[in-house]
Amino acid sequence: MCYSAIELSLQSTNKPFWNPLMKVIDHIRQSNDSAVSFEILPPLKGKTISSIYDHLDPLMEFKPAFINVTYHRSETMFKKKSDGTFEKVEVRKRPGTVGICAAIMNHYQVDAVPHLICGGFGKRETEDALIDLHFLGVDNVLVLRGDAPKNEAAFTPEPGGNQYALDLLKQVVNLNQGIYLEEDIKNGSKTNFCIGVAGYPEKHFESPNLATDLSFLKAKVDAGAEYVTTQMFFDNQKFFDFVKACRENGIEVPIIPGLKPITNKKQLSLLPKVFHVDIPADLSNAVTKCKTDEDVEQIGTEWLLQQSRELKKAGVPVLHYYTLGKPKVIWNVVKELV
Ligand code: FAD
């Protein structure tokens, strides 16, 4: 079909070129068993969308309910100029979240969930991104604050940007009610986003304690978050305790466990440092004894499978896998579950 024919068919239906799909919350409501979902990173700038398809193709046999695509702020870098001095440049190494979501929905007819972050964005840019998503028929978002840039000690919002995930969430809720930043837009078209937020079974690292962290999580839910997706964890008991604490604090929405395999020895120190999560002694001891990365991958696969089986048995709504460069490991785990 030539471009103008595609354009004509779009105009005639006035709909995106994939079938209308579902919101995460509807997937959860309609599923009798734990659904499966995957999370991917946009490829490094310069790569094509086929690197995403190569990554996801084998996993599609498990019929994921949805696929999350992470968002990455730009980083400040210093590039050497020909005269020997350095120039400060802002580089976004992994652009394309919105486009990748549209491509995934079109290519696989499966829902995509873009992550949206406060860091590095003003509210107007965020509104434009939300409008793009709305036009593309992407009705799901996971709203996050984002972290401080690598060279900064603490998170600071852009001038005119959102400070907390809660503020970004309120912006999306406003747009769902047809309230745009320009107050003179009357009867603005309402968006229809299902909004998810992040939760931390081992508490967010900036929070003084779990109770305080939960009070902020509750504020996000009270403001309109329909579900929570958690940070990775390697000890299911931490997840079960977190869900119990959420319920005791009036957080009633579905809580989706985020799961990641250990695949190399470096992760034993890297994951606690970057993600502020504990690695149980049984797992770290087994990994330490491994001689090769293949051995570590085997241990990581078995551990993740045990975690997944127990969580599925406990009736979690979705098993959400951070596939991040390791689709084969995730494939090996999920195939044992179906
Ligand atoms: P918030 O909910 O805003 O909380 C941040 C901190 O502030 C917490 O300590 C909280 O307790 C505290 N807090 C919240 N509200 C208030 C308030 N009103 N006053 C004082 N303190 C408050 N990062 C990315 O850059 N891109 C991604 O795609 C991405 N995806 C993620 C997906 C998941 C499932 C998870 C768990 C994390 C993801 N992250 C991502 C990382 C995330 O951006 C960081 O963990 C970030 O530090 C916190 O984000 P948040 O949305 O939880 O922030």
Image (spheres, rainbow, N blue to C red):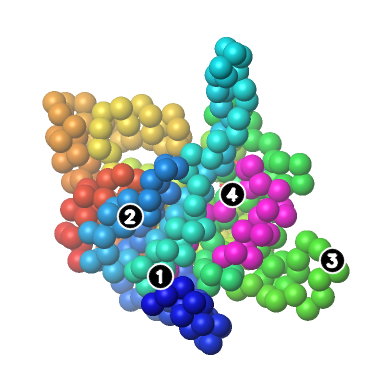
How many numbered circles are shown? 4
Q: Are marks 1 and 4 in contact (CB under 8 Å)?
A: no
Task: Determine the residue located farthest toward the bottom in the rendered image.
Answer: 12
**Structural crowding at the residue carrying mark 1, measured as other residues with C-alpha within 10 Å and reported as few (<14), some (14–19) or many (≥20):** some
Question: Which of the two residues, 295 or 42, is positioned nearer the viewer here?
Answer: 42
Which residue position holds label 1?
106
Does 60 appear above or below 245?
A: below
Q: Residue at x 45, y 58 (%)?
A: 100
SS of the residue under disc 1: helix
Task: Indicate which disc, 2 or 4, sits on the residue closer to the N terminus.
Answer: 2
Give the Cα distance between marks 2 and 3: 41 Å
Give the Cα distance between marks 4 and 3: 23 Å
Q: Residue at x 52, y 58 (%)?
A: 98
Q: On the rendering, which quadrant does ligand 1 occupy?
A: top right
Give the Cα distance between marks 2 and 1: 14 Å
Q: Which amino acid is tagged 1?
A: Asn
Magenta-colored span: 111-133
Q: Is 48 left or right of 337, judged from the image as shown?
A: right
Give the Cα distance between marks 3 and 1: 34 Å
Task: Indicate which disc, 2 or 3, sits on the residue closer to the N terminus.
Answer: 2
Which residue position holds label 2?
50
Which residue position holds label 4?
117
Q: Nearer the viewer, mark 1 or mark 4?
A: 1
SS of the residue under disc 4: strand
Q: Which amino acid is tagged 2?
A: Ser
Residue 90 place in picture, x, y as percent = 60, 34
Does 226 appear above or below 74?
A: below
